[in-house]
Image: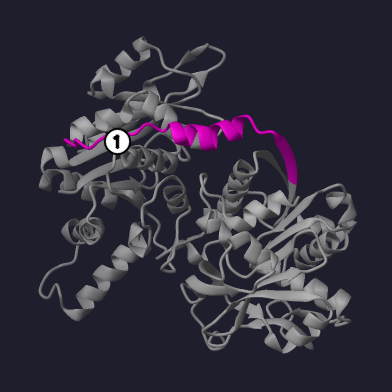
């Protein structure tokens, strides 16, 4: 019978519920349990696909083409769980489903209300994931902060869920803040007391507390938290700040969090330690042999979460190469004003990520050209590949007005154009080329050397692609089209033959990278730097 763990958060946002949930999943997998994770997002958007990265952070894309919250990226990096469309539940999805059922007459004669119709739909979706994948444990993270009006239907749903299930089948874990006041040189438990109090007002008594703190908590502090929050002292755990998020599972394991969860859920599977994770991941992060700087030329560099998976994939590549990665964030608009030499001189690696819109495009094109001319290791992802093509067309093929029709609809040389089938699409949500598509690569190319395979799948999120009309022209000048989609003959990978390592891909390799298994393109990008 599937067990359920509900993870909530209080006091402030960004406490790390996603990392905590992923770390718990990692610990439970080490016990031999089959685990999946769900993120419940309170916003009314159906998904984050149309949201600005500065509003929401990156959009994480799953194999089945779902545009989801970035926490699902944490889930996949930490665990082996199969994550897809059903693992991200939003208020928008719930209301959309309930309204469609009402229009069909499924609720004929009834008044549709938050309770029971909205809460029932939330519970049904959680149980659907558990049934479909034959799981031992499902971890459900509730987005937002306890007390937010948007989160109330989800909290009410899990309150009902715990009543409907046997007590040993559902567990509530609350992540809260225990701040350190420097001037008083003491930690304060009052925010945690208030947070748990709000949760209990809703009808949920937490079973375990994860206390986010700057330094370890004393026995006296834990006793106080336990007393005022109505939990056992052995159910109060520290979530201490660490340099790398990949250390969090080890910190939890040191406190026997996995064992406590297993006791409360009545789980009796075995228990492997995380020594392999410590040796292969943590020791290489903290004690690397080398250090390399990567210039990241992106328009959303002002928000760390906007390129979360790319930053993590670079860390993974560093682990694979026993190298610490320092990221130099470069605004492409600054390159447009002052030129690439000011920001990219002495840089040994340049990465241009995906994105949308005209702002900063010419700066990105200049950055790609600078890496091409100066034999700098280069990786262009999605839009990054497209700007590399534009640079090559303008400066190596004498196509001076080459551009993408996304930025210049009337360009006489549309080397990048709208994909077939996208021309008449008006709706923006979930209408791009999304999810996993097959790519085949040519032998004796940088792509083949990295993948060591002729065929694989990668995840996509784009509307524009390389225009095949210009393929022969660019091949004559030295551009190598090393990867393509076999069903539609779409260009997937471009590279330069006479260059240390210069590669652009239309897909997003960062979504499949893991700490113990760096993505081959990121791995070689750093290797050849």
Compared across the picture, whether 57 is left or right of 268 comes to: right
Look at mark 1 in the image and give the residue it sits on. Answer: 173
Residue at 69% of width from left, 64% of height from top? 446
Q: Is residue 249 visible?
A: yes
Q: Percent x, y for residue 13? A: 45, 40
Residue at 30% of width from left, 32% of height from top? 258
Residue 211 painted magenta: no
Question: Vertical placement of 187 versus 148: above or below?
Answer: above
Residue at 52% of width from left, 18% of height from top? 181
Q: Which residues are magenta?
A: 266-293
Residue at 52% of width from left, 37% of height from top? 280
Q: Which SS class for mark 1?
A: strand
Question: Vertical placement of 210 versus 126: above or below?
Answer: above
Looking at the rendering, which quadrant does residue 335 occupy?
bottom right
Q: Percent x, y for residue 370? A: 85, 61
Question: Vertical placement of 145 versus 206: above or below?
Answer: below
> Residue 389 versus residue 92: which sits nearer the camera?
389
Colouring mode (rainbow / by chain / secondary structure / one colour): one colour
């Amino acid at each position: 019978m599937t067990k359920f763990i509900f993870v909530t958060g209080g006091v402030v946002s960004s406490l790390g519920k996603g990392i905590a949930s992923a770390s718990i999943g990692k610990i439970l997998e080490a016990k031999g349990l089959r685990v999946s994770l769900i993120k419940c997002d309170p916003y009314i958007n159906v998904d984050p696909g149309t949201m600005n990265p500065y509003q929401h952070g990156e959009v994480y894309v799953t194999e089945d083409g779902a545009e989801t919250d970035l926490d699902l990226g944490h889930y996949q990096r930490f665990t082996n769980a199969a994550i897809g469309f059903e693992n991200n539940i939003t208020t928008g999805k719930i209301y959309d489903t309930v309204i469609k059922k009402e229009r069909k007459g499924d609720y004929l004669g009834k008044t549709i209300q938050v309770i029971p119709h909205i809460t029932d739909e939330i519970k049904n979706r959680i149980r659907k994931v558990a049934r479909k994948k034959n799981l031992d444990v499902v971890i459900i993270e509730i987005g937002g902060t306890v007390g937010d009006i948007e989160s109330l239907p989800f909290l009410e749903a899990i309150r009902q869920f715990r009543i409907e299930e046997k007590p040993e089948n559902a567990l509530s874990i609350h992540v809260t803040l225990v701040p350190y006041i420097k001037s008083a040189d003491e930690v304060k438990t009052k925010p945690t007391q208030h947070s748990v109090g709000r949760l209990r007002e809703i009808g949920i008594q937490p079973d375990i507390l994860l206390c986010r703190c700057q330094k370890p908590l004393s026995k006296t502090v834990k006793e106080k938290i336990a007393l005022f929050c109505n939990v056992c002292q052995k159910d109060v755990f520290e979530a201490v700040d660490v340099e790398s998020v990949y250390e969090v599972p080890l910190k939890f394991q040191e406190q026997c969090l996995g064992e406590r969860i297993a006791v409360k859920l009545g789980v009796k599977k075995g228990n492997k330690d995380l020594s392999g994770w410590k040796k292969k991941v943590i020791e290489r992060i903290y004690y690397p042999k080398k250090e390399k700087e990567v210039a990241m030329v992106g328009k959303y560099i002002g928000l760390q979460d906007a390129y979360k998976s790319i930053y993590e994939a670079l860390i993974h590549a560093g682990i694979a190469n026993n190298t610490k990665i320092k990221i130099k964030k470069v605004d492409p608009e600054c390159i447009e004003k002052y030129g690439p030499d000011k920001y990219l001189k002495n840089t040994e690696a340049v990465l241009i990520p995906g994105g949308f819109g005209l702002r900063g495009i010419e700066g990105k094109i200049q950055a790609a050209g600078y890496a091409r001319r100066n034999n700098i290791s280069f990786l262009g992802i999605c839009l990054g590949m497209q700007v590399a093509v534009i640079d090559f067309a303008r400066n190596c093929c004498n196509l001076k007005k080459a551009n993408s029709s996304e930025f210049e609809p009337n360009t006489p040389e549309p080397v990048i154009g709208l994909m077939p089938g996208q021309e008449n699409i008006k709706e923006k949500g979930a209408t791009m080329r999304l999810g996993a598509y097959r790519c085949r690569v040519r032998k004796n190319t940088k792509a083949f050397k990295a993948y060591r395979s002729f065929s694989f799948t990668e995840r996509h999120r784009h509307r524009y692609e390389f225009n095949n009309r210009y393929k022969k022209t660019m091949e004559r000048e030295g551009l190598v089209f090393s990867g393509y989609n076999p069903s539609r003959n779409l260009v997937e990978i471009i590279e330069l033959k006479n260059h240390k390592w210069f590669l652009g891909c239309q897909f997003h390799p960062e979504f499949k990278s893991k700490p113990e298994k760096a993505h081959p393109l990121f791995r070689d990008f750093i290797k050849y730097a």
